Image (cartoon, rainbow, N blue to C red):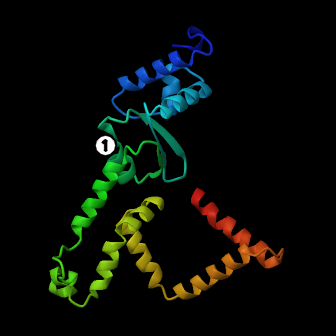
Amino acid sequence: MCDCLLPRGNAELTDQILIQKITRLDRPVTINDLGNRLKWSRGKIDGSLVRLAEKQSIAIVNISIPKGQRIRYVGLPSKSYWKFFYEQFIIKEKHILIYDTLGVLKPYQDNFKGELRKSLPSRNEGENIADNLPSKYSKIDPRILEVIEENLDRIVSAAESKNVTPLELLKSGILQITNPNFDFMVRIASVVMKEARTDEDTTDRAMALSFLRRARSLNQL
């Protein structure tokens, strides 16, 4: 249906047509796909989506693919297809979740965290967590596992923000910390951040800001 068949300024009719189109689909759809299907302008699509989102008639999920391009998906809040969406894009393809207007992915995030917790050694109250480990791990300080267990939510969130799995995040952290030059690199980073935050217009500050800009640009590669 083209714009010419709709009365100008008829927002209610526009919203009805859009929600009907979304309802007929068996999956979340991108904003561009919706525009192509309806042959509507981007402005018309966005205006209708804002109104429908305010009424909580639709859920909008914004994700970023590994190279940084952001894509908005639209769907009905009550549909089960969000489970496949989460498993495919967030878990398997490691897209980064930017925002989720109605929290349609939260149940699947919670399930994912729950599965991670199940993989940790279980223990009874008062029992040393290391008691449940194989004998070859007997030298592990149980506080290490306790720290992981207590900070699991933070580990998962940090991993999602960096577009890696929690396991990959921990592995990379271990490699960095055990690097012989780690302390030296930390001192360099501390100096750079200190110079970048100063109010004085110095050569050192300009170099620090330039370094930070170059470092941030690596995310776009």
**Which residue is more in the foreground, 25 or 53?**
53
Q: Secondary structure at mark 1?
A: helix
Q: Is residue 100 visible?
A: yes
Q: Is residue 53 left or right of residue 116?
A: right
Q: Is residue 111 left or right of residue 199?
A: left
Q: Is residue 137 left or right of residue 44?
A: left
- Residue 25 screen position, x and y as percent: 36, 26
Residue at the bottom extreme, as displayed: 139
The residue drawn where x is 60% and y is 62% is 218
The residue drawn where x is 37% and y is 47% is 105
The residue drawn where x is 58% and y is 87% is 184
In the depicted structure, whether residue 215 falls above or below residue 25: below
- Residue 166 screen position, x and y as percent: 37, 66
**Which residue is more in the foreground, 9 or 208?**
9
Residue pointed to by mark 1: 84
- Residue 38 screen position, x and y as percent: 50, 20
Quadrant of res 175: bottom left
Callout 1, which amino acid? Answer: Phe
Q: Is residue 221 visible?
A: no
**Which residue is more in the foreground, 87 or 125?**
125
Figure label count: 1
Quarter containing the C terminus: bottom right
- Residue 165 screen position, x and y as percent: 37, 62
Quadrant of res 132: bottom left
In the depicted structure, whether residue 50 falls above or below residue 111: above
**Which residue is more in the foreground, 43 or 95?**
43
The residue carrying pointer 1 sits among few (fewer than 14), some (14 to 19) or many (20 or more) residues within 10 Å by Cα, namely few
